Image: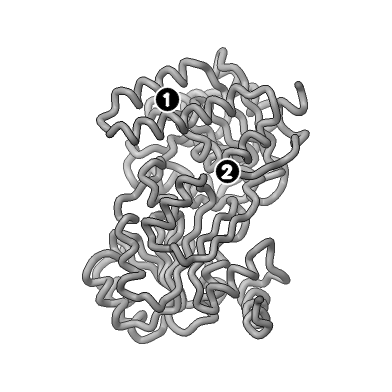
């Protein structure tokens, strides 16, 4: 039962501070639960409005809401956006100089900050933990909670230590959030973050505005060009490639064909990556060619397509990467060129890895599920949602439904 006063308080903040008329989906229930002091695990697809699920309870409760996020590159943007709404927000990460960091720390202790964004490695320092001991804490929000999973491609070792929040501050509510987690990852989040008593809020994983298409890989460059020029000329998109060299090659090739393409991978220096990301976010109609190093937390609503020139290692990876399309709710397309050579190469990488047998077994199972999605002759959306434990009917909006 949602307390009426809590709901009115939450709705008032939604209206006055953020300028929205009403909550979407399960937002109201999540916010009321956390504002009342409960722990929560929230699985909500990209574009579902996860941020408000911790921002509003933090503003409703006394003290500072501490948001743990691995996305240092985006903290500045998140904090700037909140300040535009009049929210007293700040961040602590390695990009801040000593003087600026000290000013933020003083403001936290003085109670002058509503929301503090912190990278996990910063949070776990004795200096930061001691700082939080001196502050009044409203809540902890653990964003991108799937980073705790050792089986996922976004694994961050620091996330394994975040159970310290419950041990050190057992009375402070915690909300863990992710856009992608199968049953195994869900169990891992609960176990490693000590969220056994948390209420789980699981939204539908369906992104009905995304059309899924997978084609046989014959001449991938030409196929990609035909796809982009055919349905998406002049539109913003992301092209994922498995290697840095391929990213550079495809970005140069698309540019030579008259398409505004930018590369993004961990081998580029930080300044180039930041500049390319900023251009992609601010300018219209650019195509980002990237490894999976790009995208987590990227908030560009009008990405009209996501293309894969290599098959992802798992259905979660595919879902997360394709989910960066169409966040504005308008029609978008997820396109992949797939060949059996992709699978052979990935199996070889798993077999040759130094990892233990459990990791190899789980990696192989994840690859098999992805292969099943690529090879299916039935509705791709049904297959995709079934992976996350969700039953559905044929969608009428994937390649297999439209052209059986």
Q: Which mark is residue 76?
A: none
Residue 286 in view (yes/no): no
- x and y, in percent, of residue 217 in the image: 56, 17
Asked whether 340 or 118 is in front, the reply is 340
Relative to 133, residue 346 above or below: above
Q: How is the image coloured?
A: one colour
**Residue receiving disc 2:** 388
Q: Quadrant of the N terminus?
A: bottom right
Residue at left offset 68%, top offset 68%: 23
Relative to 194, residue 16 above or below: below
- x and y, in percent, of residue 155 in the image: 36, 46
Q: How many marks?
A: 2
Task: Please indicate whether residue 246 sits to the left or right of residue 283 in the image.
Answer: left
Q: Earlier in the sequence, mark 1 or mark 2?
A: 1
Q: Secondary structure at mark 1?
A: helix
Relative to 142, residue 155 above or below: above
Q: Secondary structure at mark 2?
A: loop
Pointers 1 and 2 in contact (C-beta within 8 Å): no
- x and y, in percent, of residue 194 in the image: 38, 62
Residue at left offset 70%, top offset 49%: 329
Residue at left offset 45%, top offset 59%: 143
> In the picture, residue 145 is in which quadrant?
bottom left
Q: Which mark is residue 246?
A: 1
Q: Residues within 10 Å of mark 2 (few under 14, many from 20)?
A: some
Residue at left offset 36%, top offset 65%: 118
Residue 125 in view (yes/no): yes
- x and y, in percent, of residue 54 in the image: 52, 69
Relative to 5, residue 244 above or below: above
Asked whether 254 or 57 is in front, the reply is 57
Q: Residues within 10 Å of mark 1 (few under 14, many from 20)?
A: some
């Amino acid at each position: 039962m949602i307390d009426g006063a809590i709901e009115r308080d939450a709705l008032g903040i939604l209206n006055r501070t953020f300028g929205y008329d009403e909550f979407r989906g399960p937002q109201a229930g999540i916010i009321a639960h956390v504002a009342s002091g409960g722990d929560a695990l929230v699985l909500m697809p990209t574009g579902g409005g996860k941020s408000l699920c911790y921002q509003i309870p933090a503003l409703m409760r006394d003290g500072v809401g501490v948001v743990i996020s691995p996305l240092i590159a985006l903290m500045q943007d998140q904090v700037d956006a909140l300040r535009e709404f009049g929210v007293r927000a700040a961040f602590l990460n390695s990009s801040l100089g000593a003087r600026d960091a000290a000013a933020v720390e003083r403001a936290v202790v003085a109670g002058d900050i509503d929301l503090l964004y912190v990278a996990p490695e910063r949070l776990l320092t004795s200096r930061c933990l001691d700082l939080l001991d001196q502050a009044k804490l409203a809540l902890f929000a653990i964003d991108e909670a799937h980073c705790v999973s050792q089986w996922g491609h976004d694994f961050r070792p620091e996330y394994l230590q975040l159970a310290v929040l419950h041990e050190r501050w057992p009375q402070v509510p915690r909300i863990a959030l992710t856009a992608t987690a199968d049953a195994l990852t869900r169990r891992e989040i609960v176990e490693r973050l000590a969220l056994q008593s948390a209420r789980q809020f699981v939204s539908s994983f369906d992104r009905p505005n995304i059309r899924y298409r997978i084609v046989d890989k014959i001449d991938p460059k030409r196929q990609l060009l035909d796809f982009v020029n055919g349905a998406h000329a002049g539109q913003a998109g992301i092209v994922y490639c498995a290697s840095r060299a391929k990213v550079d090659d495809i970005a140069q090739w698309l540019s030579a064909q008259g398409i505004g393409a930018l590369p993004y991978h961990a081998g580029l220096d930080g300044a180039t990556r930041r500049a390319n990301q900023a251009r992609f976010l601010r300018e219209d109609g650019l195509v980002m060619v990237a490894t999976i190093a790009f995208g987590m937390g990227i908030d560009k609503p009008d990405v009209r397509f996501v293309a894969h020139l290599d098959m992802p290692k798992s259905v979660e990876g595919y879902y997360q990467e394709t989910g960066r399309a169409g966040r504005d709710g308008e029609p978008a397309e997820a396109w992949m060129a797939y060949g059996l050579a992709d699978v052979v190469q990935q199996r070889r990488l798993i077999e040759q890895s130094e990892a233990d047998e459990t990791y190899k077994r789980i990696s192989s199972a994840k690859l098999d599920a992805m292969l099943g999605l690529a090879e299916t002759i039935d509705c791709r959306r049904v297959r995709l949602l079934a992976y996350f434990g969700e039953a559905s009917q044929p969608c009428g909006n994937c390649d297999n439904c439209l052209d059986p």
